[in-house]
Structure formats: C-alpha cells, structure tokens
Amino acid sequence: MPASTAINNKNELIEVLRFLAAFAVFFVHIPLVEKGHFGVDVFFVISGYVMMLSTRRNGDNFFLKRLIRIVPTYYALTIAVFCIAIVMPSLLITTTPDIAHLIKSLLFIPFIKNGIEHSPILFLGWTLNYEMYFYLMFAMALAVSHRYRGLLVSVLIFSIWCLCDIADVFYTRVYGDLMVFEFVLGVLLYMIMTLKSEPQFRWQIVGIVLLLVVMMALPQEKLPASRYLFTSRFFFAGLPSVLFIYLALVFLKNRRMPGILVVLGGASYVFYLTHPYVIRLVSALTGWFDGSMVQQLLALVLSIVVANVIAVVLYRYLEAPLTNQLRKWLLRRRQSGPEQPSVA
C-alpha cells in the first residue's frame, strides 16, 4: 500500500475513533443510560498519540495550530450559551451570566461554578482545559527538542503533577489528577507503534515507562482522592483506552472506514460540545425522557439524529470555514502535507 494511502486510512480511522469517543460521552447524558465516561479518556489518549503524529516531521507553529483548531468553535459556543443564560436562563441548570465565569472559560482557567468544581460556561469545556494544558506542555517540549518531545512533555507533566502534591487546593486537584497521564499514555503508544521506523524512541520509551512506574509506586495514602491509582479513571478507563486504541490501529489500519463515520468523525468536536444541550432541548420539548420505555427510546433516537445533524451543519458552515480562514491568515508557513486529525 502506498505511504499516502496508508496515512489517509490511518487518518480516517482516527476520525472514527474520535466519533466513537464522543458518542460514548453522549450516552453519559442520556437518563436511560448514564454510562460512557470512558469516552473522555479515549479522547485524551488519542490526543497524546495525534500530537506526536502531527509533529512527526516538524513542530512549526504547533501551539498556534492548536489554538486555531480548538478556540474559534469553543468560543462561539461558549458565548452562545452565555447569551442563553442572559435571555432564557430557565433552559440551563447551573450556568448563570457571570462575566468572571465567562472570562475564565475563554482563557481555559479552571474554576468552581456555582458550587460545581471545574465546570466552565460550556458544560464539557473542563476537558478542553486539560487539552490546552497538554498542548502548552507539548509546545514547551517542542521548543527544547523536536527529537525528544515525547519524553520531555512526559517529564513536564510528571514534574507538575509532583508539585501539585504540595497543597490540596482546587488547582492542584485539577492538574494533580491522574488523568493528565492519559496524554502520556497516548505519547507512549505512538512511540511503541512507530519504533521500527523511528528507532530514536527506544530510550525515550524506557524513560516514560520509568516515570509511570514511579508515579504508580508513590505512597497513595498521602495523595488526594483523585490521585488514588486504583480508584482513578486513569486505571479503570485510561489503561483500557490505550488497549482499545492499539487494537483498533493494529487490526483496522488497512481498512477503509465507512464514509458516514468519517463524516461524523470530522464533526465530532462540535458534536461533543453541543450534544448535552440537544438532549436537554429534546427533553424539554417532548418530556419523553420522563415517560415510558418506548418514549425514552424515541427520545434517545431523536437526540442522536438531531445532535449529529446539528454537529455536521455547524462543522461544515462554522468550524471548517472559520478554521481554514484563520489558518490562511495566521500561519506563515503551509504544512508540506494535509493536516493530521486532531482531538478536542
């Protein structure tokens, strides 16, 4: 198989994995199910993997590219929800039109919103706070060395995680959560899968594994609850996510993905951010989630259809045009090839 075809197939597969992750999170917000939290962990592992993949040739304008990819859609939707909080506050549960909350949300600063920890204006924006944290760490690693970017970003994340043990306050609970190591798992997965073609990763892999061993070997009785290894989602969701992604990349690498899943994968970022509000809207308009089993199933199907349609429309007419235009305006150099898929 030609190299370009192999890359395209891998990109399609990653798009499908992103959609499956977003779709899993969708079911967390369905009253009938309320399961699927592992989708966030899949996202984080994919993010670590894709950031290594997308910088395999160079890391030019890395952080700017990430901002262009993440910020415009997130800002537009955050401001939209803020306006709803002003005009029709009854449609929202915990969000109020607090300007301080808006500013912190737009700056990806974690905060406690009306008694709920780490909950930005846009409901699922807390995961983007982690994403932007990882992008910043990755950009710093790239600034030091492209060759050792994987090991360096892992050391940075580990070092900050250790510093968070100094005090048990809100910000240290956020960045001291073991979830941050799910990005490291994605970085490690990329290194292992490309070791034959990129043998310089050999000793970096050893270094990252040692960091993870040290992290897991620390005395846990002194750690905040979110850092207990065997009760953390890093253990029961992060590690299985790595296995899931590895198996998908190995067994589906030469398979063409169904076109509809690739399209939905492209729109998965918008789908991920908007679906809780679609579910609430369907619930408010129909009341079916509080009805019989048949009505709840109808509400589920309707929510799936509406959420995906809205996501595809917003992707094609908002996210994609806005992102492409900003890339033309802000990037000084064009990538030598097509941009690799990224995770939200």
Image (spheres, helix red, strand yellow):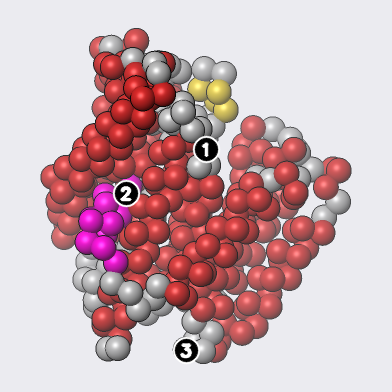
| Segment colored magenta | 257-269
Q: Nearer the viewer, mark 1 or mark 3?
A: 1
Please name the residue that numbered disc 3 is placed on.
Answer: 197
Is residue 264 rendered magenta in the image?
yes
Main secondary structure of the magenta stretch: helix
Q: Judging from the image, what secondary structure is the residue with disc 1 in?
A: loop
Q: Residue shown at 24%/34% (left/top)?
A: 306
In this rendered view, identify the residue nearer to me: 20 or 110: 20
Q: Is residue 92 visible?
A: no
**Residue type indicated by callout 1:** Lys
Please name the residue that numbered disc 2 is placed on.
Answer: 268
Please name the residue that numbered disc 1 is placed on.
Answer: 35
Q: Residue shown at 53%/84% (left/top)?
A: 195
Label 1 to label 3, Cα distance in Å? Answer: 39 Å
**Residue type indicated by callout 3:** Ser
Q: Are marks 1 and 3 in contact (CB under 8 Å)?
A: no
Whole-percent x and y of residue 119?
49, 29
- The image quarter in which residue 9 lies: bottom left
**Residue type indicated by callout 2:** Ser
